[in-house]
Image: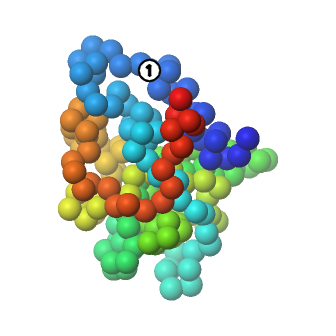
Amino acid sequence: MGVEELLVQVLREQVAEHPKSGRRMTWVYGSLHELLLESGRFFTPAELPDSVGRLPARSCYANAFAVATVRRELTYVEGYAVWEAVAGNLLHIHHAWCVDAQGVVVDPTWPTPGLAYLGLPIGPQVGAPRLGPGLIEEMEMLYPVLEAGLPAGALVDVGRPVAQESVG
């Protein structure tokens, strides 16, 4: 099983462990995990291009937003990325990065490329954070999307959709 498939499996397990309940029964998506499985895209990991400088660690949302603001050909993305930690352990982490028109990752934050990237390529009309947490971590931004769904045109058509047979 590849890293992308493992990430899908982790997200599916989260959906199964936290089913819709209470007021969330009427929501379009019961969780961020469900939103990513149904609307997220996979992107191709790559080394950071020489034309983009490395930015400070632990500031991925602001870093990706800054790069996408300067480099208009890039799209801002939020979601999960998988990174290899010590002793080969894989970490799946909330993260933000940019992608080019071919879905190739431009990650100005991590010192080496992640092993897999699954996220929401957010269009400029939706906006992105200038500082601090992004859509996926800011409940005031996330809950309306989970409740009502993504607005029309919210996502840029880039990357590879999660195969529906993977979602189950």
Q: Is residue 116 above or below residue 148?
A: below
* Whole-percent x, y for residue 3 in the image: 67, 47
Quadrant (top left/top right/bottom left/bottom right) for the N terminus: top right
Q: In this picture, is 13 found above or below 110?
A: above
Colouring: rainbow
Is residue 108 at all visible to an observer of this figure?
Answer: no
Which residue ends up furthest to the bottom in the rendered image?
Answer: 51
Q: Residue at x 50, y 21 (%)?
A: 16
User: Which structural element holds mark 1?
Assistant: loop
Identity, as a three-letter code, of the amino acid under mark 1:
His
Q: Count up the numbered dots.
A: 1
Q: Position of residue 128 (x, y in %)?
A: 28, 59
User: Relative to the observer, which residue lies in front, 95 or 55?
Assistant: 95
The quadrant where residue 65 appears: bottom left
Residue in front for this viewpoint, 99 or 153: 153
Label 1 neighbourhood size at 10 Å, few (<14), some (14-19), many (20+)? Answer: few
| Residue 85 visible somewhere in the drawing | yes
Identify the residue under disc 1. 18
Q: Residue at x 51, y 38 (%)?
A: 164
Question: For residue 30, which quarter of the picture?
Answer: top left
162 vs 70: above or below = above
- Name of the residue lying farthest toward the front: 165
- The front one of 140 and 57 is 140
Residue lying farthest right? 87
Task: Classify 100 as above or below 27.
Answer: below
Please report the residue visible at 24 percent of the width from the left and 21 percent of the height from the top. Answer: 26
Residue, x 50% and y 19% (percent of image)? 17
Question: Residue 2, how many percent across, how many down?
Answer: 71, 46
